[in-house]
Image (tube, grey):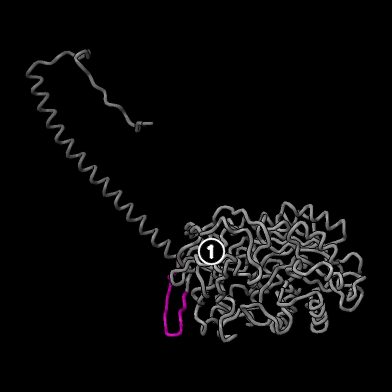
Amino acid sequence: MSSQKGGLLPIRLDSRSSRLAPTQVERDTSWSSWLRLSSVSSRLCKAQILAFVAVIYLLVVFLMFNQLLFQQSKNRVTVEERNSVGKLRLVESSKDTVEDTSQGTAEANNSMEMVNQSNVSKPAAIDGDANSLADDGITAGFKTSPDDGIVVNDSESSHLAVEQVRFLYNANVESFGPPNYCVHIFYYPWYGSPEHDGQYLHWNHRYLPHWHQAITDRFPKGRHNPPDDIGASFYPQLGCYSSRDHRVIQLHMKMLRQAGVGVMAVSWFPPSQSDDEGRPLDEVLPLILDLATTYAMKIILHMEPYKNRSAQSVLSDIQYMHKRYGSHPSLYKTTARPDSPKSLPLIYIYDSYQISPLSWAEVFTSSGSSTIRGTEDDVIAIGLLTTEVTKSEILRSGFDGFYTYFAIDKFTYGSTSNNWYGLSIFAKQHNLLFIPSVGPGYDDTKVRPWNSRNTIERVNGRYYGEKMIDGINCQTRFLSITSFNEWHEGTQIEPAIPEINSGIKYRDYRPHRPDYYLDQTRKLLEGFTCTAT
């Protein structure tokens, strides 16, 4: 389709004009006059054009100069200082900067249906897969909001990152209102740094093999090399911190108060036990409990699987918990079990389906040979529901309820939010607690590079908001969030920053601030009324 620019069309007069034809002399005189006038007009026209061009040029220069001043007022300079021990990078710029690039496609997408659970720190799936949403991109460059603080990457300077970020979260926690004890967030205290632990722990996570060697051979192997290369698709605002650093734990609790969350479900192994990537987590639990008192936080044990775990060994773990931590004021207890007015500790048991219902029944049913019901070791035990069959297993096992953990919709029967209303009805019919788990997304490709099929994009927080609303609409007594800081699987709401290290691009939360998911959590939870004690 063509178009015609605005303006007047030329008017031409031909021999049929009403004007009388001039004589030859008149024509010559008129022609000479016209030439002179044309020459003068031409010179005037050229002068006007030049003047107009000059004005436009000066205007453009003026606008460019003002834009430069404006940018300088918004952006701060990226500073890089290198020395023999490492690198300190101050990274700050405009809040409005967005630089998205598309995420590269991964191989073997169509071959992934589940994640091998026998050799992972935290298994990512039992069955099924995920439907990815629109890609929110892998951001490039170092630009971030002016409030992002200092990112420190070398081990000897890692305390600077914590100190510099602390001022961002120095608000009085009481200003965020009371914590919601109906909301439990999964928390992982398994990270380590050379400064506090003598070496990196978990940040240097190995690449996990696929259960088919032919697929494993097509992907990276070995370990990540912190601080530039870490086992996560996002980079933490605090850098490669240690979970044993009391300042880090304090910051995390301030962040959780900002998010409105009241209970930390802390990943836990019994004494001397740990996952393949870290150290015994029971060592840090006393510090977490003590600091939780200061911030009015409560602590739940999220019992992890370990070699030769059985119902009887879990019974021993529960007895140890009561003896060691039962009287601590920060250990979360509730009267949520319908058949008992007594306030009892609540525990999550991850991968509970790996032990038979008959074995669990020996511990969790009143008729079991090793029952804890009605004893001083009693607890509210929450098992993991993965498949529809697991519902009957939960009942036969004697669990007090079930949770879904995975932050991937349609990944398992339990994690599919369309099933939550039915699960809520089932739980009420059998006097069980149903605790749906919601999360902001999922990306474990830095530890399982062959598992991109199960990546769930955050879509700038939209996915999290939708799942949170689904969970709240179930009208359950409790809600769980996966997770605060499971960085390997990309489910964290802990602040992350834009980062490029040694050519490695990390994802981030832009166009939002690094603490976006803390504020979003608080706002979403305004619709979730806590009734538990």
Please state if 111 lies on the left or on the right of 338 as rendered: left
Image quarter hosting the C terminus: bottom right
> How would you classify the magenta stretch by its main secondary structure?
strand
Could you say where residue 404 lies in the image, as x and y percent from the top left? 73, 62
Can residue 216 be seen at all in this image of the molecule?
Answer: yes
The residue positioned 32% from the left and 55% from the top of the image is 61
Q: Is residue 26 above or below residue 267?
A: above
Kindly give the residue lying farthest to the left in the view shown.
Answer: 25
The picture quadrant where one finds residue 46 is top left
Please state if 484 lies on the left or on the right of 237 as rendered: right
Q: Is residue 521 above or below residue 153?
A: above
Let me know if residue 516 is in the magenta part.
no
Q: Amino acid at mark 1?
A: Ile
Could you say where residue 475 lies in the image, as x and y percent from the top left? 79, 56
Q: Which residues are magenta?
A: 76-89
Could you say where residue 247 lies in the image, as x and y percent from the top left? 63, 81
Q: Nearer the viewer, residue 97 or 106?
A: 106
Could you say where residue 98 lies in the image, as x and y percent from the top left? 49, 59
The residue positioned 12% from the left and 16% from the top of the image is 22
The residue pinned by badge 1 equals 215
Please state if 361 lies on the left or on the right of 522 as rendered: right
Q: How many marks?
A: 1
